[in-house]
Image (cartoon, rainbow, N blue to C red):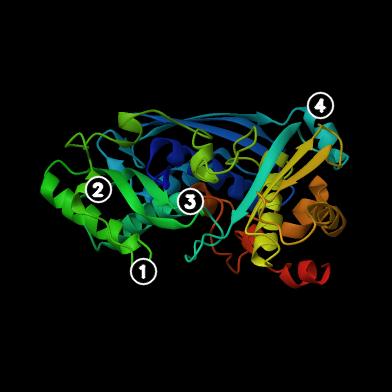
Amino acid sequence: MSYLFTSEAVSEGHPDKLCDAISDALLDLYLSHDNKSRTAIETLATTDRVIISGETSASSVTKDEIETTIRQTVKNIGYDQKSFSYNTLSIENYLHHQSSDIALGVDKQGAGDQGIMFGYAKREQGIDTNYMPIAIFLANRILKNLSQARHSGEISGILPDAKSQVTIEYDTSGKPLRASKILVSTQHTADLSQAKVQEIASKYIRSSLPQGWSIKDEDILINPTGRFVIGGPNGDTGLTGRKIIVDTYGGYAPHGGGAFSGKDATKVDRAAAYMLRYIAKNIVAAGLAQECLLQVSYAIGLKDPLSLYIDTKGTCLVDENKLLNVIKEMFDLTPHGIIKQLNLQNPIYLPTSAYGHFGRTPDNKGCFSWEKTDKIEELQKCF
């Protein structure tokens, strides 16, 4: 029998993602002043108001720079609405210095906190999804394509807040067959008819599907309530770190105990999750397994992981225990080693705040360095 699996995604204009973007834009601001900055910045957004709090290390960053960065981030996403505008929103700043107790452990190159982190990669049969599960890959692609059309002026009347949900039918061998249902809810101007909203969204849904795939009109749901004018932080309060499953594997693989945005790379919640994705992706890309799940755990103040676990779901073509030992020998999983390997002390984080932290394309500025597949040959030589 076939089976169905569903993942959801949200756009950069979703209230929670807006907050992730602000937190990561401020992280980049601090890193541009001092690449050893430590931050854990939380953002709340509601009707014409943004509140930031959390910890930072001592820095020359000024309050004016922080406010300018927040307003520019909101503007770039596209919010200039009556009840939430980059120009009129009020900003409350409650940032404070990092706890000296936390800093002590990090100063010794230990983990900044305890926790568990996961990394995952999968080769979908017959489809290039950049080693991601196809449901979350397509859910993000639909919203990203719709957003790019909005920013370029190719379409009008579509506003920043949007969600998608994609249901994939798999056969008994695990091969994805088709998109069974696709749901998109997108904010729009009051004068845009529902027929026009459906026409615009349907175009980008269909163009986002893999080559050769089609979907019936009745299997596409667009704005099921019939109207989505009031949106963004005016429609629903946003908070940093509330979309962790959207950020990772869409529920197809586990997520660890913490969110990513606003945290610098000394926070293993973020850095170790990036590292495990890097390792898992290289293992699958090297042809050693069709699927790879990794878990690691840390204790605050200690450098070395407490545990490392691998599960290739029965797809490993080599000895799994040997593969685990190779990982331990080849990759430095101390916080300092991860930062050095992936070059994580640069202002590279804002682009990660929407459309997933994984399954992206590395750029020449160092962003998405954990998506490189530069360990393929080295891994293959071990077997």
The answer to whether residue 304 is seen in the rendering is yes
Q: Nearer the viewer, residue 370 or 46?
A: 370
Disc 3 versus disc 1: distance between alpha carbons? 22 Å
Where is mark 2, residue-wise? 219
Considering the numbered disc 1 on the image, is that residue within a helix, a strand or a loop? loop
Where is mark 1, residue-wise? 211
Instruction: Estimate how packed mark 1 is, as few (under 14), some (14 to 19) or many (20 or more) residues with alpha carbons within 10 Å.
Output: few
Q: Nearer the viewer, mark 2 or mark 4?
A: 2
Q: Quadrant of the C terminus?
A: bottom right
x and y percentages locating residue 174 in the rendered image: 51, 53
Disc 4 versus disc 1: distance between alpha carbons? 54 Å
Q: Earlier along the polypeptide chain: callout 2 or callout 4?
A: 4
Inspect the image, locate mark 3, and give the three-letter code of the amino acid beneath it.
Thr
Q: Earlier along the polypeptide chain: callout 2 or callout 3?
A: 3
User: Residue at position x 47%, y 45% from top?
Assistant: 68
Q: Earlier along the polypeptide chain: callout 1 or callout 2?
A: 1
User: Residue at position x 40%, y 36% from top?
Assistant: 15
Q: Earlier along the polypeptide chain: callout 4 or callout 1?
A: 4
Considering the numbered disc 3 on the image, is that residue within a helix, a strand or a loop? loop
Q: On the image, which quarter does residue 372 sit in?
A: bottom right
Circles 3 and 4, Cβ within 8 Å, touching? The answer is: no
Inspect the image, locate mark 4, and give the three-letter code of the amino acid beneath it.
Asp
Disc 3 versus disc 4: distance between alpha carbons? 52 Å
Q: Nearer the viewer, mark 4 or mark 1?
A: 1
Where is mark 4, residue-wise? 101
User: Residue at position x 39%, y 28% from top?
Assistant: 237
Inspect the image, locate mark 2, and give the three-letter code of the amino acid beneath it.
Asp
Tell me: 89 left or right of 250. left
Disc 2 versus disc 4: distance between alpha carbons? 54 Å
User: Residue at position x 68%, y 51% from top?
Assistant: 312
